[in-house]
Image: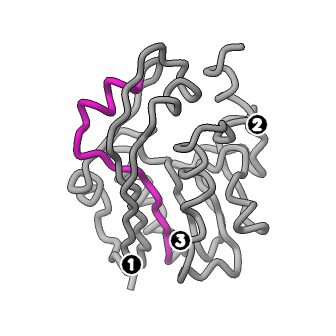
Amino acid sequence: MNNFIIDQGKSFGTWKDNTSKLLYNDVMPVLLNGIDISGAVADYGGANGLLKKFIPHIITIDIDSTKSPDIIADILNHKGNYDLVIMRYLLHYLPDKKVKDLFNNIWNSDINRILVIQFINEDIKAKNANSINETKFFRTEKQLLSLINKWIIKQTKKIYYTVEKEFYKNRLNHPNPTSHEEIIISLELIKK
């Protein structure tokens, strides 16, 4: 079975390797600790709704209908009345201009809080070497922070870990991946 095809549906993020378990499950209690998740919460790029395990009332918005999100829409121009927008492992799918546009679009709405959860890489060369069969926009912490524009960072958390080579075998069907260091950064952004 081609693991890359599994990525395109409801099984996304449920691979059994340690890195997948860390990214999609184990880090979430730490990253959500201290974040007000009451009210209307949107999961932009929420795919198959893995965050529902931690926030049962979250509304997933994704353009990929094969992942069965609650709302099928392009988050770049989606309009909704939310108390909090979560963007988990989303920004590497977008070039810099679209990331800036996304932050600006939310800024110009009634939404006042965003929680960005994103992996960053100080060794972009290693990340790109392992990221086969896809086009992504990996960033260092400095590059990510430069895209935030007007938003104020209320809270930052970081988790350092090793991406094991099994992750790339499961996620991208990579025949010869290598392990490398990576950081998950969590940024709670507010307007005021």
Q: Is residue 72 magenta?
A: no
In the rendering, at what x and y percent does residue 12 appear?
Answer: 67, 37
Q: Which residues are magenta?
A: 113-131
Residue drawn 45% across the image and 68% down it: 108
**Rendered position, 10 above or below 109:** above
Q: Residue furthest bottom?
A: 192
Q: CA distance from mark 3 to mark 2?
A: 25 Å
Find disc 2 in the rendering and name its residue.
10
Q: Which residue carries the number 3 mark?
A: 30
Q: Earlier in the sequence, mark 3 or mark 2?
A: 2
Please tell me whether mark 3 sits on a helix, a strand or a loop: helix
**Residue at 50 percent of width and 77 percent of height:** 112
User: Within 10 angstroms of label 1, few (less than 14), some, or many (20 or more) residues?
Assistant: few
* Residue 45, image x, y percentages: 59, 48
- Tell us which disc is closer to us: 3 or 2: 3
Dividing the picture into quarters, in which one does residue 55 lie? bottom right
Q: Which sits earlier in the primary sequence, circle 1 or circle 3?
A: 3
Three-letter amino acid code at the position of disc 3: Val
Q: Which residue is mark 1?
A: 155
* 56 relative to 67, above or below: below
Magenta-colored stretch includes residue 126: yes
Spatial separation of the CA atoms under disc 1 and disc 3: 13 Å
Q: Residue at x 66, y 14 (%)?
A: 2
Q: Nearer the viewer, residue 63 or 47?
A: 47
**CB atoms of marks 3 and 2 within 8 Å:** no
Crowding at label 3, few (<14), some or many (≥20) Cα neighbours within 10 Å? few
Residues at marks 1 and 2, CA–CA distance in whole angstroms:
32 Å
Above or below, 78 relative to 33: above
Nearer the camera: disc 1 or disc 3: 3
Visual colour scheme: one colour
